[in-house]
Image: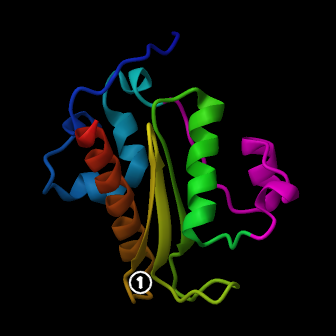
Amino acid sequence: MAAQRIELQSPAQLRPYPRNARPYEEAGPSNRLVVPGASAYYLGGGAIYTPRARHRLLDLKREDVRGLKSASEPYATLLAETVRQRFGATWGISETGASGPTGNPYGDAAGHCCYAVAGATTVAKTLETRSSDRLENMIAFTASVLALLEQQIAAR
């Protein structure tokens, strides 16, 4: 079955559950895929943990990321814009950081997240939870990037 492209009419279309329902938050971004017809609005994604994966999935070479710290707003912006372009999508989102229980090799403490939404314009933000709880950080990171996506959709 071929994916159909639709324009989101409302940010609520991203949510299979009411805003305050925990299943939506706990399952993370993949929770959008349990909704029948998800292929109409979700083109794809991935978790990129290594330079090799970044190159294979996004075709970003060392030269493309030279000088960028991976857990930074400029890097999150590059990823979101690249995803949007490569998928031919209306929106691209990305998230990078240190979910915990420890920080990352670049000096960021656990709970550090930079995320971006690329659409007609690109917006990047940083979240610092100051927590070492990996699961709670992942939930907070996901909620933050999806809230930014909702804001950008609503602002269109």
Q: Name the residue under label 1.
A: 133
Residue 5: horizontal and vertical position, in percent?
Answer: 43, 17
Look at the picture and state if 60 lies above or below 1.
below
Residue 67: horizontal and vertical position, in percent?
Answer: 77, 70
Residue 118: horizontal and vertical position, in percent?
Answer: 48, 45
Is residue 43 shown left or right of residue 70? left
Query: Going 18% across and 44% down the picture, which residue do you hit?
Result: 17
User: Who is closer to the viewer here, 104 or 116?
Assistant: 116
Residue lying farthest to the top in this orientation:
1
Look at the picture and state if 122 lies above or below 38.
below
Quarter of the image where the C terminus is located? top left
Question: Residue 77: which quarter of the image?
Answer: bottom right
Q: Give the range drawn in magenta.
A: 43-67
Does the magenta segment cover residue 55? yes
User: Who is closer to the viewer here, 111 or 9?
Assistant: 9
Query: Going 56% across and 48% down the picture, which residue do you hit?
Result: 80
Is residue 90 shown left or right of residue 23? right
Mark 1 is surrounded, within 10 Å at the Cα level, by few (under 14), some (14 to 19) or many (20 or more) other residues, namely some
Does the magenta segment cover residue 140? no
Type of colouring: rainbow
**Residue 60, can we see it?**
yes
Query: Going 44% across and 23% down the picture, which residue do you hit?
Result: 39
Residue lying farthest to the front in this orientation:
121
Secondary structure of residue under mark 1: loop
Q: Which amino acid does label 1 sit on?
A: Asp
Is residue 150 shown left or right of residue 66? left
Residue 70: horizontal and vertical position, in percent?
Answer: 67, 69
**Residue 47, can we see it?**
no
Query: Going 56% across and 42% down the picture, which residue do you hit?
Result: 45
User: Who is closer to the viewer here, 23 or 42?
Assistant: 42
User: How many discs mark residues in the rendered view?
Assistant: 1
